[in-house]
Image (tube, rainbow, N blue to C red):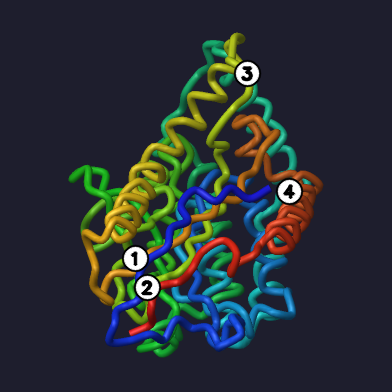
Amino acid sequence: MSDTTASVTSRPSEADDSSGLSDDGDRVTPTRVAIACQGGGSHTAFAAGVLRTWLSDGAWDDEFELVGISGTSGGAFNALAVWYGLLSADEPTAADLLESFWTDIAATGYPDRLYNEWLAAFSRLESTGAAVPQVSPYYSPVSELGTAHLARVLERHVDFEAIPALTGVGTPELVVGTVDVQGGEFETFTNDDVTIDAVLASAALPMLFEAVEIDGTAHWDGLFSQNPPVKDLMSGPVERTPEELWVIQINPQTREDTPTTPFEIADRRNELAGNLSLNQELAVVERINRWIADGHLDHPQYTTTTIRRIELRGYHHASKLDRDPEFIDELVRHGESRGREFLEGLELESDVTYPART
């Protein structure tokens, strides 16, 4: 089930009572939605399935307006596929592009499958706490081959030179998260600044890939920064501020049991570390929601945003490096199922009263 973490009511201004509802309570304008796609290696194929279901829903055009989508690491690939597919064509194209991305990312061909099996086994062994040898990506030919493979996937499906022409007033924000290795700063690339290097940098795991240089600065995987970026999605003009923020969370927020084995402890440590920046950014949104609800920010420029999370559960972090085609397909189909459950359980009007539109 989806988890609604913030749902508050704001007061419309006296000067503008346009709530987006008709006299009988039905919505007459689409709900503004922003989507944040958390990173997590192969596990983000789950998010591709969720997004495919949302895009394929026949009511999407009538009920929702996408005002922004962000992503980190594998989530950046998903965000790019949705954004580019929508702006260059339509919802079915975006949904197809998501599947094509992951079909091409999956390990196919004997050498690639053999390497994937070795890497997956290595990851499982390392997660048990066993001492395993480490090789710098700067001394491994596999690093270059992996980066080249991801670059080919991106170039096959996205015309990056066309991106500037697709951006403009009224189009959704595209946000990709990375980290500046030397400066230690979070860095996001938005809209026409999203290049193939920015997406590759967002997925550059330090022990697998060399840092990607952008404008003379080395960048690593966005998992070390905003995972995924939220602030940029909330920073637009009031008419583009999302009324709903849907977070596709790869690292589970809660666990029922206390981890006791090294395998379980390593898994929970990975989940907690992966959620640090996300929870901090969502806490800011929730704090602003409370201030509005309490009347401390009583102005039509300020709007509340309902946060909903849809989480992937039941997979150990060691399998985040597994690109086995059957595993990828399993994650995508699982995401499609969870995406349907999310939409079926979504009751916008009973969940929240939306602020006035200005």
Mark pair 3, 2: CA separation: 38 Å
Decide which of tag 4 and tag 2 comes sooner along the chain.
2
| In contact (CB < 8 Å): disc 1 and disc 2 | yes
Among the two numbered marks 4 and 1 on one chain, the one whose residue lies closer to the N terminus: 1
Indicate the amino acid at tag 2: Thr
Q: CA distance from mark 1 to mark 2?
A: 6 Å
Label located before the other in sequence (3 or 4): 3
User: Which secondary structure, mark 1?
Assistant: helix
**Residue 65, position as x, y percentages in the image:** 53, 79
Q: Can residue 47 be seen in the rendering of this structure?
A: yes
The residue tagged 1 is 234
**Numbered mark located on residue 257 in the image:** 3
Quadrant of the image occupied by residue 52:
bottom right
What's the residue at 75%, 44% (across, down)?
324
Question: Between residues 309 and 112, which one lies in front from this camera angle?
Answer: 309
* Comparing labels 3 and 4, the label whose residue is closer to the camera: 3
- Give how far apart the Cα atoms at labels 4 and 2 are: 31 Å
| Amino acid type, residue under disc 3 in the picture | Asp
Q: Which residue is mark 4?
A: 331
Residue 305 coordinates in the image, percent (x, y): 42, 63
For marks 3 and 2, the one nearer the N-term is 2
Identity of the residue drawn at 65% across and 59% down: 48
